[in-house]
């Protein structure tokens, strides 16, 4: 039978999940800004 | 010491708690109406910039929802419907929620301004301040008209979507704003009629708590009557075609019938479980989705 996680393990799991979510959001932002720049350049905006 | 003793240091909030803080269900309606405003506009916007505008509207709505929950954490703890939210349930620190809300709000306005339009960004900022400060902090705890004036906050997204596409404020985005503004009171008051005890317990002066059921039902009917000509206005003014016109007539007619049932033709044991109110509340959500979907369908199919 599997033992329930200790508070330390639970804390590490939550922080790991948060870090992954943050990394995903930042990566998505970098991609979005790249495409925004392309779109603005196509439109001839300053 | 028992095996189930709480850890000395509380666990940090999970990413799901941050997501819950943005009120994803409300956000879905905001995204939808914002997208409809953007698509119904007579000017085509670059898909990337259009996506960015909708993303900013959604993130701005999420930020103001987080600020709303930060301010109302104590009230939420008193209501069954909201007691399990991250703050009242003790899964998140209040300052973290506040900073998260401010971060999302400021970020969404800045990106909207830099990438899409500063006019759309200014209205987005106004909508965030309207919801977080005017509605949440000022009106909601003070007046039973909180929903009427606060409804303005939810009415901004289609207007912002339209302005993001056109860069201009014309009659149509103002009409879209007015439709949601007049839809909000009957939608929320129908809900408030069947969760009245929760609001009363938390000391929020919702209309049924302050003015009573009869007055609330009459006012629901007044707003439903006003909604009919208002939703027909885009058709009468020639901004929308017959597909939208017929849909608006049918949908607003049904809305009015359900409001009549709540306000006038009530009685008998079958109505004691608040079935007419629950039906009106449920239909009001479908009504808004369908009305805006028809506006976009009309634009693309009828032109």
Image: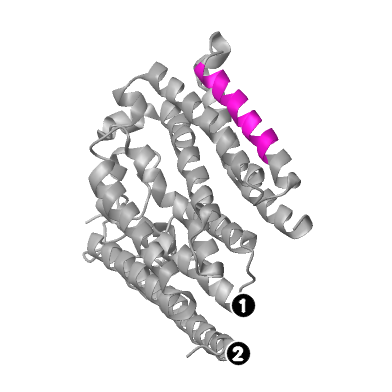
Q: Are marks 1 and 2 on the same chain?
A: no
- B100 falls in the magenta region: no
Residue B140 versus residue B119 in the image, above or below: above
Question: What residue is rendered at 48% in x and 32% in y?
Answer: B186
Instruction: Locate residue B18, reporting x and y percent.
Output: 39, 64
Instruction: Locate residue A39, reporting x and y percent.
Output: 58, 86
Instruction: Locate residue B7, reporting x and y percent.
Output: 26, 63
Q: Is residue A6 shown to the viewer in this render?
A: no
Given the current orientation, which residue lies at the most extreme top position? B268
Q: Chain of mark 2?
A: A
Q: Which residue is mark 1?
A: B46
Report the predominant secondary structure element of the magenta stretch. helix
The stretch in magenta equals B248-263
Question: What residue is rendered at 60% in x and 57% in y?
Answer: B36
**Do residues under tags 1 and 2 come within 8 Å of each other at their CB atoms?**
yes
- B255 falls in the magenta region: yes
- In the shown orientation, is residue B127 left or right of residue B286? left
Q: Which mark is residue A42?
A: 2
Name the foreground residue: B291 vs B271. Answer: B291
Task: Give the quarter of the figure containing the N terminus of chain B.
Answer: bottom left
Question: What residue is rendered at 70% in x and 34% in y?
Answer: B250
Q: Within 10 Å of the Cα at label 2, are there few (<14), some (14-19), or many (20+) other Cα atoms?
A: few
- In the shown orientation, is residue B291 left or right of residue B63? right
Residue B59 versus residue B136 in the image, above or below: below
């Amino acid at each position: 039978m599997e033992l329930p996680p200790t508070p330390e393990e639970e804390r590490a799991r939550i922080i790991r999940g948060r870090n992954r979510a943050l990394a995903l959001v930042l990566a998505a932002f970098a991609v979005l800004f790249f495409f925004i720049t392309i779109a603005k350049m196509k439109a001839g905006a300053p | 010491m028992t095996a189930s003793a709480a850890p000395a240091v509380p666990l940090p909030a999970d990413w799901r708690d941050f997501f819950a803080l943005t009120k994803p269900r409300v956000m879905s309606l905001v995204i939808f109406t914002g997208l409809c405003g953007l698509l119904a506009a007579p000017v085509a916007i670059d898909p990337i910039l259009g996506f960015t505008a909708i993303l900013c509207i959604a993130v701005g709505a999420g930020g103001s929802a987080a600020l709303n929950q930060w301010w109302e954490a104590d009230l939420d703890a008193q209501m069954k419907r909201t007691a399990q939210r991250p703050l009242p349930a003790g899964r998140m620190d209040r300052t973290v929620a506040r900073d998260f809300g401010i971060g999302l709000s400021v970020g969404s306005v800045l990106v909207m301004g830099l990438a899409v339009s500063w006019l759309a960004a200014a209205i987005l900022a106004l909508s965030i301040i309207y919801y977080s400060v005017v509605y949440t902090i000022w009106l909601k705890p003070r007046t039973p008209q909180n929903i009427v004036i606060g409804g303005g906050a939810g009415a901004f997204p289609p207007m912002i979507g339209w302005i993001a596409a056109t860069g201009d404020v014309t009659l149509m985005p103002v009409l879209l704003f007015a439709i949601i503004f007049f839809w909000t009171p009957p939608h929320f008051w129908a809900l408030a009629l069947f969760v009245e005890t929760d609001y009363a317990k938390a000391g929020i002066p919702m209309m049924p708590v302050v003015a009573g059921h009869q007055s609330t039902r009459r006012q629901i009917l007044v707003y439903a009557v006003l909604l009919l000509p208002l939703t027909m206005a885009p058709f009468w003014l020639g901004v929308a075609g017959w597909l939208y016109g017929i849909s608006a007539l049918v949908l607003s007619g049904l809305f009015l019938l359900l409001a009549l049932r709540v306000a006038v033709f009530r009685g008998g044991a079958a109505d004691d479980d608040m079935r007419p109110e629950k039906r009106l509340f449920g239909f009001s959500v479908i009504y808004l989705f369908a009305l805006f979907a028809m506006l976009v369908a009309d634009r693309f199919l009828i032109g």
